[in-house]
Image: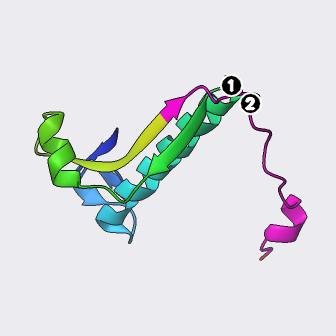
Amino acid sequence: MLSFVQGKSGKINESYVTSKANVWEVFDAGIACQTFCLAAHAKGVGTCIMGGIDEKSISKIVNLPEEETVAALIVYGYEDGEHASQTPRKDAEEIMRFVDR
């Protein structure tokens, strides 16, 4: 289970340093989720991120503190057969641009 502490991310002292305010928490949780899944894949472990979940029930089952929110569930394990190869990706030049001022 991936969770985040409400009201912590994107703040210095008690002020938000981004116009994204508390939405930044979800962004940080997404970074953590992706990093976990990429590290698992590198070790030969498969993952599946589940976001369509009953957050309240999960919080109760795992005794999550009130200030934390469930972001996602990550199911992981060894695949049957050979470890899946990476999905083909586009070259970086095809999907991003640099803005020069």
Does 92 lie within the magenta span?
yes
Q: Nearer the viewer, residue 32 or 83?
A: 83
Q: Which mark is residue 83?
A: 2
Q: Amino acid at mark 2?
A: His
Indicate the secondary structure of the residue bearing disc 1: loop
User: What is the quadrant of the N terminus in the image?
Assistant: top left
**Which residue is pictured at 80% across the width and 74% down the height?**
100
Residue 67 drawn above or below residue 45? below
**In the shown orientation, is residue 77 left or right of residue 51?**
right
Between 1 and 53, the residue placed more toward the observer is 53
Q: Where residue 71 sits: x, y (%)?
A: 34, 51
Name which quarter of the figure residue 77 lies in: top right
Say whether residue 30 is magenta. Answer: no
Range drawn in magenta:
76-100
Q: Quadrant of the C terminus?
A: bottom right
Residue 37, relative to residue 16: is it above or below? above
Find disc 1 in the rendering and name its residue: 44
Image spot of residue 41 (x, y percent): 66, 32
